[in-house]
Image (cartoon, rainbow, N blue to C red):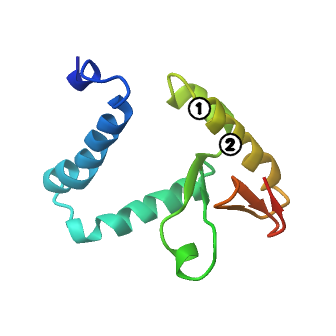
Amino acid sequence: GAYPFYQESLENYPLKLLEVINHTIDVDLTSLFHIDSNKLDKLKKIYIELMQSADLLYSLRGGSGMRAVNKPDKLLLNNPNLFQVLCANPNTGSLRESFFVSQLSYQHQVHYHDQGDFLVNDQYIF
């Protein structure tokens, strides 16, 4: 198959596949398309911001100060229906989280929380 390490260890397959994706983005694409590797992090942030503006992603951050400015603590698809198209076997937990955030973020502030999943309106931990 395209990813022969699947047969090596089913348990390690997702991690190995993630390594391939990261290598493709960080090394292969920068080389093929002459992207300055020093600007790759900024480019990733721009893509995430654009996908968030297009209502494809939620970018959740927790804390304040520099932590809130740095990379997101959690990325979620904006709508649980997107999982059906983008994921062969959507994770039930991710579907729940996506639904929760999509419903509450309409009228509330939702942030990532270390001791729970989410902090709503800086008051309620879920």
Q: CA distance from mark 2 to mark 1?
A: 9 Å
The percent coordinates of residue 69 (x first, y second) are 53, 76
Residue at image location 38% in from the left, 27% down from the top: 11
Is disc 2 placed on a helix, strand or loop? helix
Amino acid type, mark 2: Ser
Q: Is residue 39 left or right of residue 75?
A: left
Look at the picture and state if 51 lies above or below 123.
above
| Residue 98 badge | 2
Tag count in the figure? 2
Is disc 1 placed on a helix, strand or loop? helix
Task: Mark 2: give few (<14), some (14-19) or many (20+) Cα within 10 Å.
Answer: many
Quadrant assignment, res 63: bottom right
Q: Is residue 113 left or right of residue 32?
A: right
The percent coordinates of residue 54 (x first, y second) are 59, 53
Quarter that holds the N terminus: top left
Give whichever of 60, 40 is nearer the camera.
60
Give whichever of 53, 59 is nearer the camera.
59
Q: Which residue is mark 1?
A: 83
Q: Is residue 119 left or right of residue 93?
A: right
The percent coordinates of residue 25 (x first, y second) are 27, 50
Residue at image location 55% in from the left, 52% down from the top: 75
The percent coordinates of residue 49 (x first, y second) are 52, 62
Confirm or deny contact between disc 2 and disc 1 (CB under 8 A).
yes
Residue at image location 14% in from the left, 54% down from the top: 31
